[in-house]
Image: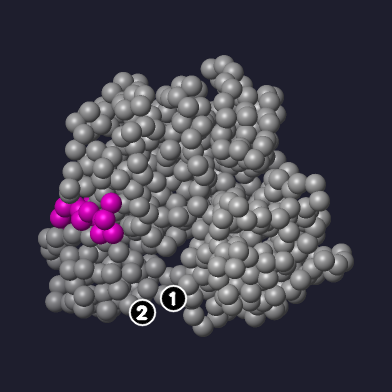
Amino acid sequence: MSTQFDKPASRDLNQLLSELHRHRGAAFALHTEPAIGHSPEQALPSVPITGITYNSKKVEPGDIFVSIEGQKVDGDAYIAEAIEKGARAVVSQKQSGPYSVPLIVVSDVRAALACLAGSIYDYPSQKLRLLGVTGTNGKTTTTHLIEHILGTAGLPVGLIGTLGARMPAAESGSDSNGKNGDSQTTSRAQSIIADSDNDPLLKRLEGDQAKAHYKPGPYIDIKHTTPQASDLEAMLATMVHHGMSHVAMEVSSHALALKRVFGVHFASACLTNISQDHLDFHNTMEHYWQSKRILFEMLGESSGKRTAVINFDDALASKFIEAVPRDVELITYGFSSEANLHVLEKKFDFSGTRLKLATPSGVIDFTTRLSGNFNLYNVMAAMAVCMGEGLSKEEIAAALTDFAGVSGRFEVVPAASAQVSAPLCLVDYAHTPDGLQNVLNTARDLVPVGGKLVAIFGCGGDRDTSKRPQMGHIAEDLADQLVITSDNPRSEDPMLIINDILSGLKRLKKVTVEVDRARAIRHTVMAASPQDVVVIAGKGHETYQILKDKTIDFDDRLEVSKALHERTGGLKGI
Protein backbone atom coordinates (compact mmCIF):
# COMPACT_ATOMS: atom_id res chain seq x y z
CA MET A 1 0.00 0.00 0.00
CA SER A 2 1.43 3.34 -0.96
CA THR A 3 1.02 6.45 1.12
CA GLN A 4 -1.32 7.76 -1.58
CA PHE A 5 -4.63 5.91 -1.42
CA ASP A 6 -6.51 5.10 -4.59
CA LYS A 7 -8.63 7.96 -5.97
CA PRO A 8 -12.32 7.20 -6.51
CA ALA A 9 -14.11 7.44 -9.85
CA SER A 10 -15.83 10.76 -10.62
CA ARG A 11 -19.39 11.08 -9.30
CA ASP A 12 -22.00 13.77 -9.94
CA LEU A 13 -22.88 15.91 -6.91
CA ASN A 14 -26.62 15.60 -7.61
CA GLN A 15 -26.37 11.83 -7.64
CA LEU A 16 -24.44 11.81 -4.37
CA LEU A 17 -27.01 14.04 -2.66
CA SER A 18 -29.89 11.96 -4.02
CA GLU A 19 -28.22 8.82 -2.71
CA LEU A 20 -27.65 10.43 0.68
CA HIS A 21 -31.27 11.50 0.88
CA ARG A 22 -32.56 8.12 -0.30
CA HIS A 23 -30.55 6.06 2.19
CA ARG A 24 -30.30 8.47 5.11
CA GLY A 25 -33.09 10.97 4.48
CA ALA A 26 -34.58 10.55 7.93
CA ALA A 27 -31.23 11.34 9.53
CA PHE A 28 -30.49 14.59 7.71
CA ALA A 29 -32.19 17.87 7.05
CA LEU A 30 -30.66 18.60 3.65
CA HIS A 31 -30.66 22.16 2.39
CA THR A 32 -28.59 23.42 -0.54
CA GLU A 33 -27.46 27.00 -0.98
CA PRO A 34 -26.62 27.66 -4.64
CA ALA A 35 -23.33 29.08 -5.79
CA ILE A 36 -23.02 32.80 -6.48
CA GLY A 37 -24.81 33.62 -9.72
CA HIS A 38 -27.41 30.86 -9.34
CA SER A 39 -30.87 31.43 -7.90
CA PRO A 40 -32.51 29.02 -5.42
CA GLU A 41 -35.13 28.22 -8.06
CA GLN A 42 -32.53 26.87 -10.47
CA ALA A 43 -31.66 23.19 -10.39
CA LEU A 44 -28.23 22.39 -9.00
CA PRO A 45 -25.87 22.18 -11.98
CA SER A 46 -23.98 19.00 -12.76
CA VAL A 47 -20.81 19.09 -10.65
CA PRO A 48 -18.27 16.25 -11.04
CA ILE A 49 -16.86 15.13 -7.66
CA THR A 50 -13.58 13.21 -7.47
CA GLY A 51 -12.86 13.15 -3.75
CA ILE A 52 -13.86 14.24 -0.26
CA THR A 53 -11.94 15.67 2.68
CA TYR A 54 -12.42 17.45 5.99
CA ASN A 55 -8.92 18.98 5.93
CA SER A 56 -8.59 22.18 3.90
CA LYS A 57 -4.83 21.59 3.53
CA LYS A 58 -5.52 18.33 1.68
CA VAL A 59 -8.18 19.63 -0.70
CA GLU A 60 -7.58 18.73 -4.34
CA PRO A 61 -9.51 20.07 -7.35
CA GLY A 62 -12.83 18.23 -7.60
CA ASP A 63 -13.20 17.47 -3.87
CA ILE A 64 -16.12 18.05 -1.55
CA PHE A 65 -14.91 19.93 1.52
CA VAL A 66 -16.74 18.89 4.69
CA SER A 67 -16.54 21.55 7.41
CA ILE A 68 -16.45 20.00 10.88
CA GLU A 69 -16.61 22.03 14.06
CA GLY A 70 -14.15 20.34 16.41
CA GLN A 71 -13.20 20.95 20.02
CA LYS A 72 -10.55 23.51 19.06
CA VAL A 73 -11.06 24.39 15.39
CA ASP A 74 -14.16 25.32 13.37
CA GLY A 75 -13.92 24.05 9.80
CA ASP A 76 -16.03 26.97 8.54
CA ALA A 77 -13.00 29.21 9.03
CA TYR A 78 -11.27 27.27 6.22
CA ILE A 79 -14.06 27.18 3.64
CA ALA A 80 -12.55 29.99 1.57
CA GLU A 81 -9.15 28.24 1.54
CA ALA A 82 -10.78 24.96 0.47
CA ILE A 83 -12.63 26.64 -2.39
CA GLU A 84 -9.46 28.41 -3.50
CA LYS A 85 -7.73 25.01 -3.69
CA GLY A 86 -10.45 23.62 -5.94
CA ALA A 87 -13.28 22.30 -3.75
CA ARG A 88 -16.42 22.03 -5.89
CA ALA A 89 -18.92 21.89 -3.02
CA VAL A 90 -18.97 22.48 0.74
CA VAL A 91 -20.89 20.57 3.41
CA SER A 92 -21.52 22.17 6.81
CA GLN A 93 -23.97 22.20 9.70
CA LYS A 94 -24.11 25.99 9.59
CA GLN A 95 -25.49 28.48 7.12
CA SER A 96 -22.86 30.83 5.69
CA GLY A 97 -21.72 32.29 2.40
CA PRO A 98 -22.63 32.85 -0.34
CA TYR A 99 -19.72 31.09 -2.05
CA SER A 100 -18.65 30.38 -5.60
CA VAL A 101 -19.62 26.72 -5.09
CA PRO A 102 -22.78 25.10 -3.66
CA LEU A 103 -23.12 24.86 0.14
CA ILE A 104 -24.98 21.81 1.43
CA VAL A 105 -26.28 22.39 4.97
CA VAL A 106 -26.96 19.20 6.96
CA SER A 107 -28.15 18.47 10.48
CA ASP A 108 -25.27 16.07 11.27
CA VAL A 109 -22.06 16.88 9.43
CA ARG A 110 -20.03 13.93 10.82
CA ALA A 111 -22.62 11.42 9.67
CA ALA A 112 -22.86 13.22 6.34
CA LEU A 113 -19.08 12.94 5.87
CA ALA A 114 -19.25 9.20 6.55
CA CYS A 115 -22.20 8.61 4.22
CA LEU A 116 -20.84 10.72 1.37
CA ALA A 117 -17.42 9.09 1.67
CA GLY A 118 -19.01 5.65 1.57
CA SER A 119 -20.90 6.59 -1.57
CA ILE A 120 -17.92 8.25 -3.28
CA TYR A 121 -15.73 5.18 -2.66
CA ASP A 122 -18.56 2.78 -3.63
CA TYR A 123 -19.11 1.21 -0.20
CA PRO A 124 -15.88 -0.81 0.12
CA SER A 125 -16.82 -2.32 3.50
CA GLN A 126 -19.51 -4.31 1.68
CA LYS A 127 -16.89 -5.87 -0.59
CA LEU A 128 -14.72 -7.47 2.08
CA ARG A 129 -15.01 -8.92 5.58
CA LEU A 130 -14.38 -6.08 8.05
CA LEU A 131 -13.49 -7.40 11.51
CA GLY A 132 -13.81 -4.70 14.18
CA VAL A 133 -12.14 -4.94 17.60
CA THR A 134 -13.00 -2.52 20.39
CA GLY A 135 -12.17 -2.32 24.11
CA THR A 136 -9.90 -0.46 26.49
CA ASN A 137 -6.83 -2.67 26.26
CA GLY A 138 -5.70 -5.38 23.87
CA LYS A 139 -7.08 -4.02 20.59
CA THR A 140 -3.69 -3.76 18.89
CA THR A 141 -2.47 -7.21 19.87
CA THR A 142 -5.82 -8.81 19.03
CA THR A 143 -6.02 -7.27 15.55
CA HIS A 144 -2.42 -8.30 14.83
CA LEU A 145 -3.23 -11.83 15.98
CA ILE A 146 -6.23 -11.90 13.65
CA GLU A 147 -4.10 -10.58 10.79
CA HIS A 148 -1.44 -13.21 11.46
CA ILE A 149 -3.91 -16.10 11.71
CA LEU A 150 -5.80 -15.20 8.54
CA GLY A 151 -2.62 -14.37 6.63
CA THR A 152 -0.94 -17.61 7.66
CA ALA A 153 -4.08 -19.45 6.52
CA GLY A 154 -3.66 -17.92 3.05
CA LEU A 155 -6.28 -15.18 3.16
CA PRO A 156 -5.34 -11.69 1.90
CA VAL A 157 -5.84 -9.53 4.98
CA GLY A 158 -5.34 -5.84 5.73
CA LEU A 159 -4.83 -4.14 9.08
CA ILE A 160 -5.91 -0.74 10.42
CA GLY A 161 -5.09 0.46 13.93
CA THR A 162 -2.82 2.21 16.41
CA LEU A 163 0.43 1.25 14.68
CA GLY A 164 -0.86 2.25 11.25
CA ALA A 165 -2.40 0.55 8.21
CA ARG A 166 -0.85 -2.19 6.14
CA MET A 167 -1.48 -5.01 3.67
CA PRO A 168 0.61 -8.04 2.68
CA ALA A 169 3.99 -7.14 1.24
CA ALA A 170 4.41 -7.06 -2.54
CA GLU A 171 6.35 -10.31 -2.50
CA SER A 172 3.32 -11.98 -0.89
CA GLY A 173 1.75 -12.29 -4.32
CA SER A 174 1.48 -8.70 -5.60
CA ASP A 175 2.73 -7.30 -8.86
CA SER A 176 4.88 -4.21 -9.20
CA ASN A 177 1.82 -1.97 -9.12
CA GLY A 178 0.74 -3.40 -5.80
CA LYS A 179 -2.26 -5.23 -7.28
CA ASN A 180 -2.62 -8.80 -6.20
CA GLY A 181 -1.04 -10.93 -8.88
CA ASP A 182 -2.04 -14.35 -7.51
CA SER A 183 -5.07 -15.59 -9.43
CA GLN A 184 -5.82 -18.20 -6.78
CA THR A 185 -5.89 -15.58 -4.02
CA THR A 186 -7.90 -13.13 -6.12
CA SER A 187 -10.53 -15.66 -7.12
CA ARG A 188 -10.84 -16.78 -3.49
CA ALA A 189 -11.36 -13.21 -2.29
CA GLN A 190 -13.97 -12.60 -4.97
CA SER A 191 -15.73 -15.83 -4.04
CA ILE A 192 -15.93 -14.81 -0.38
CA ILE A 193 -17.33 -11.40 -1.22
CA ALA A 194 -19.80 -12.66 -3.80
CA ASP A 195 -21.45 -15.17 -1.48
CA SER A 196 -21.05 -14.86 2.28
CA ASP A 197 -22.47 -18.36 2.68
CA ASN A 198 -19.48 -19.80 0.81
CA ASP A 199 -16.82 -21.54 2.84
CA PRO A 200 -13.99 -18.95 3.11
CA LEU A 201 -11.51 -21.83 3.11
CA LEU A 202 -12.67 -23.16 -0.26
CA LYS A 203 -10.04 -21.49 -2.42
CA ARG A 204 -7.48 -20.68 0.26
CA LEU A 205 -3.83 -21.45 0.00
CA GLU A 206 -2.95 -24.26 2.36
CA GLY A 207 -0.19 -25.53 4.62
CA ASP A 208 3.40 -24.46 4.05
CA GLN A 209 2.41 -22.71 0.81
CA ALA A 210 0.23 -20.31 2.80
CA LYS A 211 2.93 -19.65 5.40
CA ALA A 212 5.52 -18.99 2.72
CA HIS A 213 3.07 -16.77 0.85
CA TYR A 214 2.17 -14.52 3.78
CA LYS A 215 4.31 -11.55 4.74
CA PRO A 216 2.82 -8.32 6.13
CA GLY A 217 3.92 -5.11 4.46
CA PRO A 218 5.17 -1.91 6.13
CA TYR A 219 2.88 0.33 8.18
CA ILE A 220 1.78 3.69 6.92
CA ASP A 221 0.98 6.37 9.48
CA ILE A 222 -2.75 7.10 9.81
CA LYS A 223 -2.63 9.54 12.78
CA HIS A 224 -5.59 8.02 14.65
CA THR A 225 -6.32 4.49 15.88
CA THR A 226 -9.48 4.62 13.74
CA PRO A 227 -9.20 7.15 10.89
CA GLN A 228 -11.70 9.88 10.08
CA ALA A 229 -14.54 8.57 7.89
CA SER A 230 -13.26 9.82 4.52
CA ASP A 231 -9.75 8.48 5.20
CA LEU A 232 -11.18 5.15 6.36
CA GLU A 233 -13.29 4.70 3.24
CA ALA A 234 -10.26 5.54 1.08
CA MET A 235 -8.16 2.92 2.91
CA LEU A 236 -10.85 0.26 2.60
CA ALA A 237 -11.35 1.04 -1.09
CA THR A 238 -7.60 0.72 -1.66
CA MET A 239 -7.58 -2.62 0.15
CA VAL A 240 -10.49 -3.86 -1.95
CA HIS A 241 -8.66 -2.77 -5.10
CA HIS A 242 -5.58 -4.69 -3.99
CA GLY A 243 -7.53 -7.89 -3.44
CA MET A 244 -8.02 -8.00 0.32
CA SER A 245 -10.81 -10.33 1.46
CA HIS A 246 -10.53 -9.36 5.15
CA VAL A 247 -9.49 -6.33 7.21
CA ALA A 248 -8.80 -6.46 10.96
CA MET A 249 -9.49 -3.01 12.40
CA GLU A 250 -9.25 -1.38 15.81
CA VAL A 251 -12.41 0.62 16.52
CA SER A 252 -11.90 3.28 19.19
CA SER A 253 -14.57 4.80 21.41
CA HIS A 254 -13.79 8.19 19.84
CA ALA A 255 -14.46 6.78 16.37
CA LEU A 256 -17.81 5.36 17.44
CA ALA A 257 -18.92 8.47 19.33
CA LEU A 258 -17.77 10.81 16.54
CA LYS A 259 -19.32 8.67 13.78
CA ARG A 260 -16.09 7.89 11.94
CA VAL A 261 -17.48 4.42 11.19
CA PHE A 262 -21.08 5.52 10.62
CA GLY A 263 -22.62 3.44 7.83
CA VAL A 264 -19.69 1.02 7.67
CA HIS A 265 -20.59 -2.67 7.36
CA PHE A 266 -18.89 -4.95 9.89
CA ALA A 267 -18.77 -8.73 9.50
CA SER A 268 -17.51 -9.19 13.04
CA ALA A 269 -17.39 -7.16 16.26
CA CYS A 270 -15.12 -8.10 19.16
CA LEU A 271 -14.94 -6.74 22.72
CA THR A 272 -11.63 -7.12 24.57
CA ASN A 273 -12.47 -5.47 27.91
CA ILE A 274 -13.76 -2.30 29.52
CA SER A 275 -11.86 -0.32 32.13
CA GLN A 276 -11.27 3.37 32.76
CA ASP A 277 -9.84 5.45 29.93
CA HIS A 278 -10.56 8.59 27.90
CA LEU A 279 -12.79 10.21 30.52
CA ASP A 280 -11.34 13.54 29.40
CA PHE A 281 -13.48 12.99 26.28
CA HIS A 282 -16.40 10.86 27.48
CA ASN A 283 -16.76 12.43 30.97
CA THR A 284 -18.49 9.31 32.37
CA MET A 285 -17.78 5.59 32.23
CA GLU A 286 -21.33 5.01 31.04
CA HIS A 287 -20.87 7.20 27.97
CA TYR A 288 -17.54 5.47 27.35
CA TRP A 289 -18.84 1.90 27.31
CA GLN A 290 -22.08 2.82 25.57
CA SER A 291 -20.00 4.36 22.77
CA LYS A 292 -18.15 1.07 22.37
CA ARG A 293 -21.42 -0.89 22.37
CA ILE A 294 -22.45 0.93 19.18
CA LEU A 295 -20.11 -1.41 17.26
CA PHE A 296 -22.27 -4.40 18.20
CA GLU A 297 -25.49 -2.59 17.39
CA MET A 298 -24.05 -1.82 13.95
CA LEU A 299 -23.92 -5.54 13.12
CA GLY A 300 -27.67 -5.24 12.57
CA GLU A 301 -27.05 -2.91 9.61
CA SER A 302 -24.79 -5.41 7.86
CA SER A 303 -25.83 -8.48 5.88
CA GLY A 304 -24.51 -11.99 5.43
CA LYS A 305 -22.74 -14.02 8.08
CA ARG A 306 -21.84 -11.92 11.11
CA THR A 307 -20.21 -12.76 14.42
CA ALA A 308 -20.10 -11.01 17.80
CA VAL A 309 -17.19 -11.96 20.06
CA ILE A 310 -17.45 -10.84 23.70
CA ASN A 311 -15.20 -11.22 26.76
CA PHE A 312 -17.53 -13.13 29.08
CA ASP A 313 -15.42 -12.27 32.14
CA ASP A 314 -15.86 -8.52 31.70
CA ALA A 315 -18.20 -6.89 34.21
CA LEU A 316 -20.15 -5.29 31.37
CA ALA A 317 -20.38 -8.39 29.19
CA SER A 318 -24.15 -8.68 29.62
CA LYS A 319 -24.64 -5.10 28.37
CA PHE A 320 -22.81 -5.95 25.17
CA ILE A 321 -24.52 -9.30 24.73
CA GLU A 322 -27.88 -7.50 24.94
CA ALA A 323 -26.83 -5.30 22.00
CA VAL A 324 -26.09 -8.23 19.65
CA PRO A 325 -28.84 -8.64 17.01
CA ARG A 326 -30.64 -12.01 17.13
CA ASP A 327 -29.48 -13.12 13.69
CA VAL A 328 -25.79 -12.65 14.60
CA GLU A 329 -23.67 -15.55 15.87
CA LEU A 330 -22.41 -14.92 19.42
CA ILE A 331 -19.13 -16.40 20.70
CA THR A 332 -18.05 -15.64 24.26
CA TYR A 333 -14.58 -16.25 25.65
CA GLY A 334 -12.77 -16.01 28.97
CA PHE A 335 -11.54 -17.97 31.96
CA SER A 336 -15.10 -18.71 33.09
CA SER A 337 -16.24 -22.22 32.20
CA GLU A 338 -19.53 -20.67 31.05
CA ALA A 339 -17.80 -19.00 28.10
CA ASN A 340 -18.01 -20.73 24.72
CA LEU A 341 -14.22 -20.59 24.47
CA HIS A 342 -12.35 -20.83 27.77
CA VAL A 343 -9.07 -21.81 29.41
CA LEU A 344 -8.75 -25.33 30.76
CA GLU A 345 -5.04 -25.28 31.56
CA LYS A 346 -2.18 -22.77 31.26
CA LYS A 347 1.51 -22.84 32.05
CA PHE A 348 3.76 -19.81 31.71
CA ASP A 349 7.53 -19.85 31.27
CA PHE A 350 10.18 -17.65 29.68
CA SER A 351 9.39 -19.05 26.24
CA GLY A 352 5.68 -18.22 26.43
CA THR A 353 2.63 -20.26 27.38
CA ARG A 354 1.44 -23.84 27.12
CA LEU A 355 -2.31 -23.54 26.70
CA LYS A 356 -5.29 -25.88 26.69
CA LEU A 357 -8.58 -24.36 25.56
CA ALA A 358 -12.16 -25.57 25.32
CA THR A 359 -13.70 -24.27 22.09
CA PRO A 360 -17.12 -24.63 20.43
CA SER A 361 -15.59 -27.36 18.23
CA GLY A 362 -13.66 -29.22 20.93
CA VAL A 363 -10.49 -29.03 23.03
CA ILE A 364 -7.19 -27.78 21.59
CA ASP A 365 -3.73 -27.86 23.17
CA PHE A 366 -0.92 -25.63 21.82
CA THR A 367 1.90 -23.24 22.70
CA THR A 368 2.19 -19.52 22.10
CA ARG A 369 5.15 -17.20 22.53
CA LEU A 370 2.88 -14.71 24.32
CA SER A 371 2.71 -14.69 28.10
CA GLY A 372 0.40 -13.37 30.81
CA ASN A 373 -3.34 -13.64 31.42
CA PHE A 374 -3.99 -10.41 29.52
CA ASN A 375 -2.39 -11.93 26.43
CA LEU A 376 -4.42 -15.12 26.83
CA TYR A 377 -7.55 -12.99 26.56
CA ASN A 378 -6.16 -11.51 23.34
CA VAL A 379 -5.39 -14.98 22.00
CA MET A 380 -8.90 -16.23 22.78
CA ALA A 381 -10.52 -13.13 21.26
CA ALA A 382 -8.58 -13.54 18.01
CA MET A 383 -9.28 -17.26 17.96
CA ALA A 384 -13.03 -16.67 18.35
CA VAL A 385 -13.07 -14.06 15.56
CA CYS A 386 -11.22 -16.39 13.20
CA MET A 387 -13.43 -19.34 14.07
CA GLY A 388 -16.34 -17.08 13.14
CA GLU A 389 -14.63 -16.64 9.76
CA GLY A 390 -14.61 -20.41 9.20
CA LEU A 391 -11.09 -21.38 10.26
CA SER A 392 -10.61 -24.57 12.27
CA LYS A 393 -9.15 -24.57 15.75
CA GLU A 394 -6.19 -26.59 14.47
CA GLU A 395 -5.30 -24.03 11.81
CA ILE A 396 -5.60 -21.20 14.30
CA ALA A 397 -3.45 -22.96 16.91
CA ALA A 398 -0.77 -23.70 14.31
CA ALA A 399 -0.64 -20.00 13.35
CA LEU A 400 -0.53 -18.84 16.97
CA THR A 401 2.50 -21.00 17.70
CA ASP A 402 4.85 -18.73 15.73
CA PHE A 403 3.26 -15.32 16.40
CA ALA A 404 6.16 -13.23 17.73
CA GLY A 405 4.17 -10.41 19.31
CA VAL A 406 3.50 -6.75 18.57
CA SER A 407 5.87 -3.79 18.64
CA GLY A 408 5.84 -2.09 22.04
CA ARG A 409 3.58 -4.66 23.67
CA PHE A 410 5.45 -6.50 26.43
CA GLU A 411 8.46 -6.23 24.13
CA VAL A 412 11.78 -7.51 25.41
CA VAL A 413 14.73 -5.22 24.66
CA PRO A 414 17.69 -7.59 24.30
CA ALA A 415 20.98 -7.04 26.06
CA ALA A 416 23.93 -5.87 23.96
CA SER A 417 25.59 -9.26 24.39
CA ALA A 418 24.28 -12.63 25.52
CA GLN A 419 27.49 -13.03 27.53
CA VAL A 420 26.83 -9.91 29.63
CA SER A 421 24.57 -10.11 32.69
CA ALA A 422 21.81 -7.52 32.44
CA PRO A 423 18.30 -6.96 33.77
CA LEU A 424 15.32 -8.14 31.76
CA CYS A 425 13.87 -4.95 30.23
CA LEU A 426 10.28 -4.88 28.95
CA VAL A 427 8.66 -2.00 27.04
CA ASP A 428 4.88 -1.83 27.03
CA TYR A 429 2.18 0.60 25.91
CA ALA A 430 0.21 0.20 29.17
CA HIS A 431 -1.24 3.65 29.86
CA THR A 432 -4.39 2.83 31.83
CA PRO A 433 -4.79 1.52 35.40
CA ASP A 434 -5.97 -1.88 34.17
CA GLY A 435 -3.25 -2.09 31.53
CA LEU A 436 -0.48 -1.25 34.01
CA GLN A 437 -1.85 -3.78 36.51
CA ASN A 438 -1.90 -6.55 33.88
CA VAL A 439 1.64 -5.86 32.71
CA LEU A 440 3.14 -5.64 36.20
CA ASN A 441 1.36 -8.81 37.33
CA THR A 442 2.75 -10.69 34.33
CA ALA A 443 6.24 -9.22 34.78
CA ARG A 444 6.22 -10.28 38.44
CA ASP A 445 6.10 -13.93 37.35
CA LEU A 446 9.37 -13.39 35.48
CA VAL A 447 11.34 -12.02 38.47
CA PRO A 448 13.83 -14.63 39.74
CA VAL A 449 14.64 -15.22 43.38
CA GLY A 450 16.66 -12.27 44.67
CA GLY A 451 15.48 -9.93 41.94
CA LYS A 452 13.23 -6.85 42.01
CA LEU A 453 10.40 -5.63 39.80
CA VAL A 454 11.09 -2.03 38.79
CA ALA A 455 8.44 0.10 37.09
CA ILE A 456 9.21 3.26 35.10
CA PHE A 457 6.13 5.17 33.99
CA GLY A 458 4.32 8.49 33.76
CA CYS A 459 0.94 9.72 32.54
CA GLY A 460 -0.05 11.70 29.48
CA GLY A 461 -0.87 15.39 29.70
CA ASP A 462 -4.22 16.86 28.60
CA ARG A 463 -5.86 13.50 29.25
CA ASP A 464 -7.99 11.91 31.98
CA THR A 465 -6.41 13.13 35.24
CA SER A 466 -8.36 10.79 37.51
CA LYS A 467 -6.37 7.74 36.43
CA ARG A 468 -3.03 9.22 37.53
CA PRO A 469 -3.30 8.49 41.28
CA GLN A 470 -4.86 5.11 40.46
CA MET A 471 -1.83 4.15 38.40
CA GLY A 472 0.48 5.33 41.16
CA HIS A 473 -1.37 3.18 43.69
CA ILE A 474 -1.31 0.11 41.42
CA ALA A 475 2.41 0.47 40.69
CA GLU A 476 3.21 0.89 44.39
CA ASP A 477 1.32 -2.30 45.23
CA LEU A 478 2.83 -4.44 42.49
CA ALA A 479 6.40 -3.20 41.96
CA ASP A 480 9.36 -3.23 44.34
CA GLN A 481 10.74 0.04 43.07
CA LEU A 482 9.09 2.95 41.24
CA VAL A 483 10.57 5.54 38.92
CA ILE A 484 8.00 8.24 38.14
CA THR A 485 8.78 10.27 35.03
CA SER A 486 7.24 12.10 32.09
CA ASP A 487 5.14 10.47 29.39
CA ASN A 488 3.74 12.87 26.76
CA PRO A 489 3.14 15.95 28.95
CA ARG A 490 1.72 18.01 26.08
CA SER A 491 0.61 21.42 27.38
CA GLU A 492 0.77 20.46 31.08
CA ASP A 493 3.64 20.97 33.50
CA PRO A 494 5.30 17.52 33.77
CA MET A 495 5.91 17.97 37.50
CA LEU A 496 2.22 18.61 38.16
CA ILE A 497 1.37 15.35 36.37
CA ILE A 498 3.95 13.53 38.50
CA ASN A 499 2.46 15.05 41.65
CA ASP A 500 -0.95 13.68 40.63
CA ILE A 501 0.61 10.22 40.35
CA LEU A 502 2.38 10.57 43.71
CA SER A 503 -0.91 11.50 45.40
CA GLY A 504 -2.02 7.89 44.92
CA LEU A 505 0.91 6.46 46.86
CA LYS A 506 0.57 5.53 50.52
CA ARG A 507 4.29 5.82 51.17
CA LEU A 508 7.20 7.30 49.28
CA LYS A 509 9.75 4.58 50.00
CA LYS A 510 11.71 3.21 47.07
CA VAL A 511 10.30 5.91 44.79
CA THR A 512 12.46 7.98 42.46
CA VAL A 513 11.20 11.03 40.59
CA GLU A 514 13.02 12.00 37.39
CA VAL A 515 11.18 14.31 34.98
CA ASP A 516 13.58 13.61 32.11
CA ARG A 517 12.39 10.26 30.71
CA ALA A 518 15.66 9.44 28.94
CA ARG A 519 17.63 10.05 32.13
CA ALA A 520 15.12 8.03 34.16
CA ILE A 521 15.52 5.04 31.84
CA ARG A 522 19.31 5.27 31.68
CA HIS A 523 19.85 5.57 35.43
CA THR A 524 17.39 2.79 36.24
CA VAL A 525 18.77 0.30 33.71
CA MET A 526 22.36 1.08 34.71
CA ALA A 527 21.59 0.59 38.41
CA ALA A 528 19.48 -2.57 38.06
CA SER A 529 20.91 -5.95 38.98
CA PRO A 530 20.97 -8.85 36.49
CA GLN A 531 18.17 -10.48 38.51
CA ASP A 532 15.84 -7.47 38.15
CA VAL A 533 12.97 -7.04 35.73
CA VAL A 534 12.51 -3.45 34.54
CA VAL A 535 9.16 -2.47 32.99
CA ILE A 536 9.07 0.77 31.01
CA ALA A 537 5.37 1.52 30.56
CA GLY A 538 3.20 4.06 28.80
CA LYS A 539 4.67 4.75 25.35
CA GLY A 540 5.36 1.33 23.87
CA HIS A 541 5.77 1.60 20.09
CA GLU A 542 5.84 5.42 20.03
CA THR A 543 8.88 7.05 18.46
CA TYR A 544 8.22 10.57 19.74
CA GLN A 545 7.51 12.55 22.89
CA ILE A 546 4.99 15.40 22.85
CA LEU A 547 6.18 18.37 24.93
CA LYS A 548 4.54 21.73 25.49
CA ASP A 549 6.14 23.54 22.59
CA LYS A 550 7.46 20.75 20.35
CA THR A 551 7.49 17.06 19.54
CA ILE A 552 10.86 15.34 19.76
CA ASP A 553 12.20 12.00 18.55
CA PHE A 554 12.01 9.54 21.42
CA ASP A 555 11.79 5.76 21.59
CA ASP A 556 11.76 3.88 24.92
CA ARG A 557 13.28 0.83 23.24
CA LEU A 558 16.18 2.84 21.86
CA GLU A 559 16.84 4.48 25.23
CA VAL A 560 16.82 1.09 26.97
CA SER A 561 19.10 -0.37 24.30
CA LYS A 562 21.60 2.47 24.72
CA ALA A 563 21.63 1.97 28.49
CA LEU A 564 22.14 -1.79 28.13
CA HIS A 565 24.96 -1.17 25.68
CA GLU A 566 26.59 1.27 28.07
CA ARG A 567 26.56 -1.41 30.78
CA THR A 568 29.01 -3.33 28.58
CA GLY A 569 31.26 -0.30 28.22
CA GLY A 570 30.26 0.10 24.59
CA LEU A 571 28.95 3.65 24.98
CA LYS A 572 29.94 6.38 27.38
CA GLY A 573 28.18 9.50 28.51
CA ILE A 574 24.86 8.98 26.75
Q: Which residue is mark 1?
A: 73
- The residue that disc 2 covers is 77
Give left or right: position of 200 versus 543.
left
Residue 422 occupies which quadrant of the picture?
A: bottom right
Is there a contact, CB below 8 Å, between mark 2 and mark 1? yes
Q: Is residue 407 above or below residue 342?
A: below
Task: Say few, some or many: other residues with alpha carbon within 10 Å of mark 1 (under 14 / 14 to 19 / 20 or more).
Answer: few
Which residue is depicted at the point 63% across and 24% down?
A: 356
Residue 18 visible? The answer is yes
Callout count = 2
Q: Based on the displayed image, in which of its 4 quarters is residue 51 positioned? A: bottom left
Q: What residue is shown at x 43% (from left), y 38% (from top)?
A: 148
The answer to if 349 sits in the magenta stretch is no
> How far across and how far down the image is residue 304, in percent?
37, 29
Q: Which residues are magenta?
A: 1-20
Q: Is residue 67 above or below residue 225?
A: below
Can you tell which mark lies on residue 512? none
| Helix, strand or loop for disc 2 | helix
Residue neighbourhood size for the residue with mark 2, other residues' Cα within 10 Å, grouped as few (<14), some (14–19), many (≥20): few
Q: Quadrant of the C terminus?
A: bottom right
Q: Nearer the viewer, residue 92 or 471?
A: 471
Q: Secondary structure at mark 1?
A: loop
Amino acid type, callout 1: Val
How far from the left and from the top, in percent, is residue 508?
A: 85, 69
Question: Amino acid type of disc 2?
Answer: Ala
**Depicted 315 relative to depicted 384: above or below:** below
Q: Is residue 112 left or right of residue 536?
A: left
Residue at the bottom extreme of this rendering: 549
Image x and y of residue 174, in percent: 22, 42
Q: CA distance from mark 2 to mark 1?
A: 8 Å
Q: Residue at x 17, y 68 (%)?
A: 61
